[in-house]
Amino acid sequence: MDLLRHKKAAAGRGFLDDQFLIAMPGMKDDRFARSVIYICAHSDEGAMGLIINQTQQMLFPDLLVQLGIMNEQEAIRLPAHTRDFVVRNGGPVDRSRGFVLHSGDYRVESSLNVSDDICLTATVDILRAISTGRGPRHALMALGYSGWGAGQLETEISENGWLTCPATPELLFDTDIERKYDRILASIGIDLAHLSAAAGHA
């Protein structure tokens, strides 16, 4: 997408890059209810991120077979940790496109640095590498992404749609997907019971 190409060319970081975006209780869009989004690119032109706490029905081996990376017999023989690699729902945009967020120990030419420690790769090379045990130490895979036009995300934040906080690799990559929303809120000292769904104005 254009925002990622622009980020790669500019080699700069937007102020929301490498941040968690946490849906507030009053989130009007059901697709984002209780969602946590990792922001990969943010600039004056808009923002792009991946929901990290919603899963797809599709399994990773099924995806490898569908993409022609391996056949069904090879997929059956994958080691358990690869077979169980969860495919997440990254967002409502371009849902047939895959993205892998991963630790910086793996890089190819198409990899985009989101932070010093986190990269985004959207080519099949990384799926082949993961399937053969040559991939990054930490990774998460998502189909689709979440996108905002110029100024849209900033408006949603100002209207109390989202909370933001710095992301940590531990919370980004751990596999406890079901409790991720509550745990990220707890990590910044917020009790969901005390969150208001309405914006406050002084």
Image: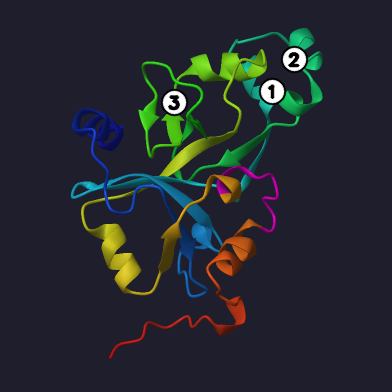
| Residue type, numbered disc 2 | Ala
Which secondary structure class fits the magenta region best? loop
Q: Is residue 136 above or below residue 58?
A: above
Query: Residue 100 placed where, x, y %?
Result: 51, 31
Question: Does residue 154 appear to the left or right of 72 in the view shown?
Answer: left
Label 3 amino acid?
Answer: Ala
Going from the N terminus, do you reach mark 3 or mark 2 first? 2
* Mark 1 or mark 3, earlier in chain: 1
What's the CA distance linking mark 3 and mark 2?
A: 21 Å
Q: State the residue position of label 2.
A: 75
Label 1: state its secondary structure.
helix
**Numbered circle sitting on residue 62:** 1
- Is there a contact, CB below 8 Å, between mark 1 and mark 2? yes
SS at badge 3? loop
Q: What amino acid is labelled 1 in the image? A: Asp
- Determine whether 158 is above or below 202 in the image: above
Disc 1/disc 3 C-alpha distance (Å): 18 Å
Q: Position of residue 65 (x, y in %)?
A: 66, 15
- Residue located 75% across and 25% down the image: 83
Structural distance between the alpha carbons of marks 1 and 2: 8 Å
Please report contact status of discs 1 and 3: CB closer than 8 Å, yes or no: no
Q: Which residues are magenta?
A: 172-179
- 56 above or below 192? above
Q: What residue sits right under mark 3 in the picture?
A: 122
Disc 1 versus disc 3: nearer the observer: 3
